[in-house]
Amino acid sequence: MTSQRAMMLAALAFFIWVLSDTAMKIGCMNAGVVPVPAIMAIVGIIGSLIISTGSLALGRNHALLPSAGYSMHLTMAICFSGNVVANAIAFKHLPLTSFYIVVFTTPLTIAVLSAAMKYEKLTRHKIACLLAGFLGMLLAIGGASGGGDLTGYIAAAMGTICFSTNALLMRKSAKEASVESIQLFNYLCMGLIGCVWIVISNAQMPSLSVLGVIAASGTLLAIGSLCFNTALQNTVATNVAQLHYTQIIYGSITGYLIWNEVPTWSLLFGSGIIICAGLLVARQAKIEDKLTA
């Protein structure tokens, strides 16, 4: 597969993930209470089946076997589950466009966490980008339509931190374990926790229609993961990460068509600042990688 086709596949993955987020938001909004155990069980089971089936179909059954330390796998599984649950809560409290504003700080969050975990240093260039991105987020949130509350923003922020931590750990364990084995372990753990939670707490299950929407979201999430993983195997991660910002286009269109969320100029301008700051951080990281190669 050429690098250009890999980039197209990555763009498709981000589009599919927006559809997954949209379905999850619809399911959570239609449920009286966010069905956290049901979300974990359904998404975990469906994701495990799709990742396994897809890997076997591509002749990569060997890639499903865990080869990194189980403590590392377990930590990433906890972060993965935390991201899914936090996002589900955020969807119930935030417009889709507001949710993506927080999510777009992921590259900046990764830079901060990477420095905190002593993987790399924060240069003046990165600090300036972090401050610009934070100001852009405040500007965009202030111009978001449809409101949202503190619970939603806290949940979205926690989801971003979990996703960023998982991404850093995945980068660290890339030489020891395949992406497929990590993804499979993530889904299996989340599905198991969800099933046990349902049994122990005797959790009230949502309606069949809500369960169906959550199942559709889980299916799209796993399919997007397969596309994303394949793209990562055929081009550099920096190129793929830059396509993350295409979600603001898909999310804005979806939010407008379904919930009549009209982006304001303040939201668009703030989002633009976040995107530019994130791209500059990614560009600097790419230059540093070449210098240390």
Image: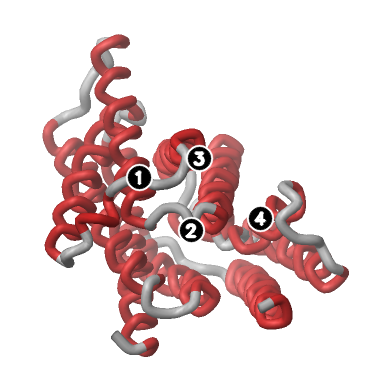
Crowd class of label 1 (few under 14; some 14 to 19; many from 20; radius 10 Å): some
Determine the CA span between mark 2 and mark 1: 12 Å
Residue 86 in view here: no
Residue 142 in the image, given as x and y percentages of width and height: 66, 57
Residue type at the position of mark 2: Ala
Residue visible at 49% across and 77% down in the picture: 236
Between the residue at mark 4 and the residue at mark 3, the CA separation in whole angstroms equals: 20 Å
Does residue 58 appear to the left or right of 227 in the view shown? left
Please rate how many residues cluster around mark 2, counting C-alpha atoms within 10 Å: few if below 14, some from 14 to 19, many from 20.
Answer: few
Report the mark closest to the observer, 2 or 4.
Answer: 2
Residue matched to label 4: 109
Q: Residues within 10 Å of mark 3 (few under 14, many from 20)?
A: some
For label 1, the SS is: loop
Please tell me which of labels 2 and 4 falls first in the chain: 4
Placement of the C terminus among the 4 image quadrants: bottom right
Q: Earlier in the sequence, mark 2 or mark 1?
A: 1
Query: What is the three-letter code of the residue carrying label 1?
Result: Pro
